[in-house]
């Protein structure tokens, strides 16, 4: 379909993240009042990707009587809806809005609105770029006239006008550099902004002095175009991070916003998670996530804890079972008692571990800062040396001063300021097209340095979704019968059975679900049971768990008809990813919270020799920290809540889009496609970006080697400075663009898969 | 030389006009959804500016 612009890969994610609608209470909590009885809700709709999507969603929303106006933002894949609190005296249920979007075939979910301030900084930067651009073009126009031969009063007039334009621009657009330089100097450090701030200030001051004395040369054009180029670099850097962040916050939330509190008198009340106190009773329906750490009081269910601790088999929960916040309640409804507040829940413990682990990453110094550490003292020493040299040589201290300023301007890291951000923006664009989001530029620099890759198992190397083994060996009729039963359950193994059955399904009577056991139905032929061995009536086979597979038994009147075995399916591209990393000489290991047999099976399949099983979040973190202490640079790839501290502790980290919120926030990279090949793709792009950055540095330094002697000898005129500066900047930018290029096969394939317009078909 | 008295202010004014127009368009949110705007222009049904 041709209507799909690049970047449609969001649709794949939309499909995977498909889940229940946010509840009315959650939507109400997330909406904000905009006055006059109107409220505004912002929903993330990751599936929208073309013009038809806009019309479909907006049309469906505007048709609702309660909706005042609705607007889709295609760039951020969000829709903002303004709705009336009450229509004709009846309260509006905000869920009808989400339901209307869902009815058009798109998923809608809430996202956390936390990053308003960054938007403001981005706009400030763009405004500064506009102002600097305006000033640079106008001053350049006047300077060209001067270089073409304007003399005497005309030249002075032009210089004066330039001074009046440059002054305010320096203060308005240069404030980002001044602030950053001042911060660095105050703490006794230098960064790239110190020589920049010094050069623009000094060159402006000297040019003003020259203008006052009707001199021939003024450097206003150099001052302002320097500012312009550097601001472009800074803005690109910021926009790149912005884009990744808005894409990441748009993904589905995995932690609930609130929970249904049951009061002692039986009345129910929906409250934000933060307001739930210890000892309160909560009701958790099937399909909801556990809001806080709790103990089950009544009810029975299966609970999927894969995102909490990496266990691939669901836990059967009954009265007395302890559950951690973040786990998913699958089959039955539960009444639970909160044993910790949200602040002290499992998740917060993990966040605490994460904060403790983040020290290593904070110590990392960006490549540009490391370059500045060598570069800026060298520049300052050089300028000082030429000043003293010329002063003592001919005794003309004013001329010496002019030469020193020329050296500062010529060496000012214009190309250096662009060398890193342009490459990183181009690299981020390439990664984005391949479905990988980068949090910031330093992540890319760190990824290029790794020598060890550590993987989590459940949800990372595997999909965390069971798949039937030996589908061709099982009896077709039994499979169809089992699928008929399984269709009534939300248990992952049941869903896998339904998926595995290709043929028609026999019609059976009323199926009852025994939580923690299985499914049961009474037919004329006898009582059919589908579930674990104990429930279905078979005797427990000793050592049945040794092979690392889960199993489900189908029985009639207690006699086993068929045993279905399930494996946790490998993520697509896992083999390719592992072998590609192995070729690059990266060491690999698996750290999992799951049982040893399951981990051993996956490690054997992929040929990874080093693995550890049954690890707690703390042990995972320590294991990663030990490797780092041995001098290794570790890449952590993981998705669960239990991986989050290890993700933070590693030198650099990658998480799939299906990861828990906290894991996604801890990771430096998030990949949206299902294929694990995104990992070697990101690694390869990061390494190529690193190479280009070093080339750019070499180009910028090479330019200095030629230009600096000219400046030191006192031959640099403003014209030479302007030409040298622009050419070096252009060369650096053009060199960076070489990073674009063909996307690898997996990304192209995933983009194609995103195209079959699932939402549109449903909408039709 | 005399023409400069007119030409320079005119040049600066026109440049300033462009700058002001850009700043206004930024402030009024016209760059918030660049991708969406590219599609909306093809939409037949919507001949009024959006709310």
Image (cartoon, coloured by chain):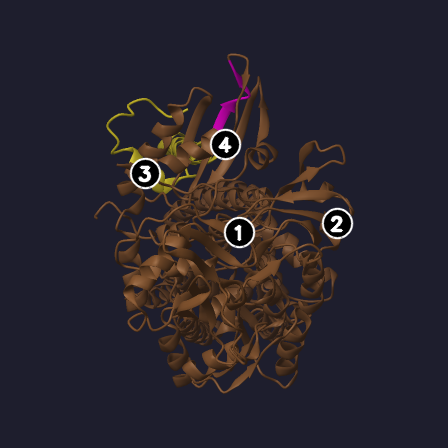
Chain colours: A brown, B yellow
Name the subunit of mark 2.
A
Q: Assign the magenta stretch its main secondary structure.
A: strand
Q: Label 1 to label 2, Cα distance in Å?
A: 25 Å
- Looking at the image, is mark 1 or mark 3 earlier in the sequence? 3
- Looking at the image, is mark 2 or mark 3 earlier in the sequence? 3
- Looking at the image, is mark 2 or mark 4 earlier in the sequence? 4
Residue receiving disc 4: A95
x 73%, y 51%: residue? A343
Q: Is residue A199 visible?
A: no
Is residue A426 placed above or below B51 in the rendered structure? below
Q: Residues within 10 Å of mark 1 (few under 14, many from 20)?
A: many
x 30%, y 37%: residue? A763
Circle 4 sits in a helix, a strand or a loop, which is it? helix
Q: Label 2 to label 4, Cα distance in Å?
A: 27 Å
Circle 1 sits in a helix, a strand or a loop, which is it? loop
- Looking at the image, is mark 1 or mark 2 earlier in the sequence? 1
- Decide which of A702, B3 is in the foreground and name it: A702
Q: Are marks 2 and 3 on the same chain?
A: yes
Residue receiving disc 2: A341
């Amino acid at each position: 379909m041709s209507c799909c612009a690049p970047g449609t890969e969001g649709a794949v994610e939309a499909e995977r993240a498909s889940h229940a609608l946010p509840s009315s209470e959650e939507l109400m909590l997330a909406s904000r009042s905009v006055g006059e009885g109107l409220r505004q809700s912002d929903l993330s709709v990751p599936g929208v990707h073309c013009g038809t999507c806009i019309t479909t969603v907006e049309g469906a929303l505007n048709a609702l009587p309660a909706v005042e106006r609705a607007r889709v933002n295609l760039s951020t894949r969000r829709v903002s809806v303004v709705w009336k609190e009450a229509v004709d005296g009846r309260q509006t249920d905000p869920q009808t809005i989400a339901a209307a979007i869902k009815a058009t075939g798109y998923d809608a979910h809430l996202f956390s609105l936390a990053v308003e301030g960054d938007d403001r900084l981005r706009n400030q930067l763009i405004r500064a770029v506009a102002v600097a651009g305006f000033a640079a073009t106008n001053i350049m126009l006047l300077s060209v006239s001067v270089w073409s031969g304007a003399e005497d009063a005309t030249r002075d007039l032009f210089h004066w006008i330039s001074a009046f334009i440059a002054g305010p621009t320096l203060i308005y657009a240069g404030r980002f550099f001044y602030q950053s330089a001042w911060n660095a100097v105050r703490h006794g450090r230098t960064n790239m902004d110190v020589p920049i701030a010094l050069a623009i200030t000094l060159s402006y001051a000297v040019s003003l002095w020259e203008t006052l004395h009707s001199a021939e040369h003024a450097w206003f054009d150099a001052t302002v175009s320097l500012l312009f180029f550097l601001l472009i670099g800074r803005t690109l850097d910021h926009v790149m991070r912005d884009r990744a962040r808005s894409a990441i916050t748009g993904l589905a939330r995995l932690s609930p916003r609130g929970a249904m509190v049951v009061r002692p008198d039986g009345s129910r009340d929906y409250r934000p998670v933060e307001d739930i106190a210890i000892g309160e009773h909560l009701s958790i329906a099937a399909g909801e996530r556990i809001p806080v750490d709790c103990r089950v009081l009544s009810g029975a269910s299966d609970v999927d804890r894969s995102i909490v601790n990496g266990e691939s088999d669901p836990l059967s929960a009954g009265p007395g079972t302890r559950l951690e916040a973040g786990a998913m309640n699958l089959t039955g409804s539960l009444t639970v008692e909160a044993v910790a507040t949200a602040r002290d829940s499992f998740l917060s413990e993990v966040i605490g571990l994460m904060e403790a682990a983040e020290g290593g990453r904070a110590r990392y110094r960006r490549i540009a800062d490391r370059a500045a550490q060598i570069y800026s003292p060298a520049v300052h020493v050089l300028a000082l040396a030429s000043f003293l040299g010329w002063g003592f040589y001919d005794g003309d201290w004013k001329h010496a001063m002019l030469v020193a300023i020329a050296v500062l301007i010529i060496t000012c890291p214009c190309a250096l300021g662009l060398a890193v951000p342009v490459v990183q923006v181009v690299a981020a664009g390439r990664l984005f097209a391949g479905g990988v989001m980068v949090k910031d530029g330093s992540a890319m620099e760190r990824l290029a340095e790794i020598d060890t890759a550590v993987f989590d198992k459940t949800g990372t190397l595997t999909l965390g979704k069971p798949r039937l083994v030996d589908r061709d060996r099982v009896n077709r009729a039994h499979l169809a019968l089992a699928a008929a039963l399984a269709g009534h359950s939300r248990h992952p193994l049941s869903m896998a059975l339904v998926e595995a059955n290709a043929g028609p399904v026999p019609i059976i009577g009323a199926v009852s679900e025994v939580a923690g056991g299985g499914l049961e139905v009474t037919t004329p032929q006898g009582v059919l049971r589908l579930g674990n061995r104990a429930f279905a009536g078979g005797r427990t086979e000793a050592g049945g768990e040794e092979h690392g597979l889960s199993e489900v038994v189908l029985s009639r009147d207690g006699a086993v008809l068929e045993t279905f075995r399930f494996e946790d399916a490998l993520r697509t591209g896992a083999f390719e990813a592992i072998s590609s990393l192995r070729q690059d000489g990266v060491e690999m290991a698996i750290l999992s919270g799951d049982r040893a047999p399951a981990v051993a099976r996956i490690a054997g399949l992929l040929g990874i020799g080093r693995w550890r099983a049954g690890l707690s979040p703390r042990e995972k973190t320590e294991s990663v920290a030990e490797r780092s202490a041995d001098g290794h640079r570790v890449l952590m790839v993981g998705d669960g809540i239990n991986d989050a501290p290890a993700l933070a502790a590693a030198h650099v980290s990658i998480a799939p889009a299906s990861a828990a919120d906290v894991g996604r926030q801890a990771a430096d990279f998030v990949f949206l496609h299902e294929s694990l090949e995104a990992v070697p793709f990101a690694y390869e792009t990061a390494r190529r970006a690193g190479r280009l950055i070093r080339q750019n540095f070499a180009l910028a330094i090479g330019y200095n080697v030629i230009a600096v002697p000219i400046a030191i000898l006192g031959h640099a005129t403003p014209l030479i400075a302007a030409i040298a500066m622009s050419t070096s900047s252009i060369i650096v930018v053009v060199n960076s663009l070489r990073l674009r290029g063909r996307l690898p096969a997996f990304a192209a394939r995933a983009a194609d898969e995103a195209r079959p317009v699932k939402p549109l078909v449903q909408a039709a | 030389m005399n023409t400069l008295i007119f030409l320079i202010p005119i040049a600066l004014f026109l440049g300033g006009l462009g700058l002001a127009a850009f700043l206004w368009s930024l402030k009024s949110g016209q760059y918030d959804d660049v991708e969406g705007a590219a599609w909306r222009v093809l939409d037949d049904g919507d001949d009024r500016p959006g709310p």
